[in-house]
Image: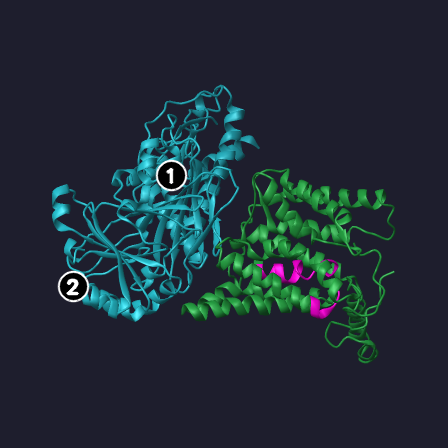
Chain colours: A cyan, B green
Amino acid sequence: MKRTFVTVAAGVAMAAAAGAAQAFCGFYVGKADATLFNDASKVVMVRDGERTVINMLNDYQGALTEFAMVVPVPVVLQKEDVKTPFRAVFDRLDAYSAPRLAEYYDPNPCNPPRPRALSAPQNLAKKSVGRGMIAEDRAEELGVRVEAQYTVGPYDIVILSATQSDGLETWLHENGYRIPAGASKALAPYIRQDMKFFVAKVNLEEHAKSGAHFLAPLQFSFRSEKFMLPIRLGMINARGPQDLVLWVLTKKGRVETTNYRTVKLPANVNLPPYVKFDKTHSFGRFYKAMFDERAKREGHRVVFTEYFWDMGWCDPCAANPLTAQELANLGVDWARGNTRRGAPVKLTRLHMRYTPETFPEDLAFQETADRRNWQTRYVLQHPAKFDLADCENPQNAQRYLVQLGGRQEREAQTLANLTGWNIDAIRAKTRAAHAETPLSIAPGAASPAADWPFGQLWRWLHSEGA
Amino acid sequence: MRPQIIVPPIGAVGPRAATQGPGAWRGLRDRLGRLAHLDARLYQIAFLAVLLGAGVLARDFSLQAEQVALTFAAGIATQLFWVRALGLHRVGVLSAVITCFGLAVLLRADSLWVHPLAAAACLSAKFLVRANGKHLFNPTNLGVVLAVLTLPGAWISPGQWGADLLLACWVVALGGVVANRARSFDMSAAFLVCYLGALAARVAWLGQDWGVLAHQLQSGALLVFAFFMISDPMTIPSRMRARLAYAACVAGLAYAWQYVFYVPNGPVWALFLCAPLVPLLDGIWPGVQPTWGSAQGSARRPAPEAR
């Protein structure tokens, strides 16, 4: 059973599972009742000692004039601390770390084992503020202080500090931000902790100059002992569970949350090979259904690890590791000047689906000393094709068929168990897949499609062999 | 021999109750009564075994069976070595088994050699690093700290317990029994009151939802620490007032570690750093050490085998 071909990037397809839930580390605020739409939040964090870089990808799809974002940050950010990384790097990082499908082919039991022809890798689910004038007097009156104000790329950015949450809420209201109800209560803990607020709006002129269709991602870096990500603000206007996909780039080892359970998704199991071609049970859909099922079973209380690997390599590779330049774009400064691609960079990919009730606190992290690479990899084991009537080693072939029947049933049960899909539907699809590429069977035996793929063969083997 | 237990800790089981009632019921109560007189360490071992089993099976502890086996092999061998080398009598391996369970439950490693090395080091320290006739550090605590500080690929996973209410209830209930047996419940209670009090004050000050406190309260890691680590009768001050002061110190430092300096695993580090205070406190308030079976701080003779 040689491995002959690998891959399939599922991309962020499963990340989009949250549907229209409005998620983000901060929150979006609009100035009209336009429906704001934000799929799973995508955040890339870089942590080296106390140096932290946070990259946020915008999937905002509403009118640009309505876009604004508020994110609590530990320190006042200066203009040089804020950048707009390339959107494409997010896609690269996503592709590199995506859950993957590995394919293997059974050797023909009639012949000595020999690898089969390779197929090409495939992507099943490819995805990979300007208020101009700030009225300082009024701000002071409200206990709000404009710590810094500048334009970076297509964004007008204001860094605020506040002494009281009501004042901040009023200030945001008066400056044209539509703050969701309950914002004041959510803002208060950050103000108490002396955190600042990073507020970004789109500068339409700058955006038009760039000619980009999408909003550029935002990156800000700072030094802080806090290794955390504020998610509570983004829950104010949440409807239903929200998704967050978080990539963390560190030097030493795997990153996990210290105030929530971090668990690995079920992986490295065999799935029925028809998953490769089927539309309703495709790999992308499988992964989404599996994630839904696990998140539900865990009561939306856990953080899932999807990938942890040394960025220098991969096996199997869903995409090539990021180059030093790409990593530098995300804020990894220790990979700079390194001619080998991102050698000492460790990547942890976390995926969580949370509700305000199940995640009452912001996410706190620690970098563990765990260096064991791990990935969400699923295996397709294709049965051998051979003619039983013309088989040089019929005993071996018969043994193989018996084992194969058991294996297919186990694969069907695994798929049903992981996704909650109907097992009879899975069996029917397995049958149909084999009807299209039938296994040659001995003369006299009934059509294999008439029953479970190898049911007839089994019966035949048992009656003949007895 | 073990000192006599004076309080029957399980329900109404006592000599008077045991003499009443019909045969079968009386027999059961007699048996429970005898159970109550067992060494507290047996309860601890049983409980930690359940905890470890549940963690490995239901909680994705990412712990390998080989790591557990090597921890026990190294731990018990080290204990036996020192008992022989120092010519000690009536010293068994029960406390070493507890230490090994503690290490397996708390310590995580990405290789096989971290656990046995930590077990050997901390159990050796138990015999070698002593003050006033008792060991200075709780062996599990020392083992975890040494491993994280000095060995590559070792860490503590404070979040792996999850905020599972049921688990927390079990830990409290069973931990309470164990701590009662060990007569050091005052340590656990004082630590929890101080630490949770500080957490509650923080939640109130920040204006956070009380769900945050409930979330922190349900942490299995915190309760395991409170009931199995800080309450070890062999490493706590002898007098009650000293114990309360000590618990407050550990709780204060743990809080600061976690919420002022933002470093995880506050309680474990705080206990390690506060351990040298025990001889000092014993100097200020001298008393007789409580043991695994004795009444707390009473005038009873300390058990020589309790190591």
In this view of the protein, can residue A323 be seen by the observer? no
- Mostly what secondary structure, the magenta segment? helix
Q: Name the kind of residue labelled 1 in the image.
A: Ser
**Residue in view at x 71 percent, y 42 percent:** B120
Q: Name the kind of residue labelled 2 in the image.
A: Ala
Nearer-the-camera pick, A41 or A154: A154
| Image quarter of the C terminus of chain A | top right
Q: Which mark is residue A32?
A: 2
Tag 2: Cα neighbours inside 10 Å, few (<14), some, or many (≥20)?
few
Nearer-the-camera pick, A368 or A465: A368
First of labels 2, 1 by sequence position: 2
Chain hosting mark 2: A
Determine whether A393 is above or below B110 in the image: above
In this view of the protein, can residue A396 be seen by the observer? yes
| Residue B25 x, y percent position in the rendering | 78, 74
Nearer-the-camera pick, A61 or A219: A219
| Residue B253 x, y percent position in the rendering | 57, 60
Are discs 2 and 1 less than 8 Å apart at CB? Answer: no
Determine whether A140 is above or below A111 in the image: below
**Is residue B128 part of the magenta span, yes or no?**
no
Residue stretch rendered in magenta on the structure:
B222-242
| Residue B179 x, y percent position in the rendering | 69, 65
Q: Secondary structure at mark 1?
A: helix
Question: In the visual, does A12 lie left or right of A304?
Answer: left
Question: In the visual, does B193 lie left or right of B8?
Answer: left
The number of numbered badges drawn on the structure is 2
C-alpha separation, residue under disc 2 versus residue under disc 1: 37 Å
Q: Secondary structure at mark 2?
A: loop
The residue tagged 1 is: A97
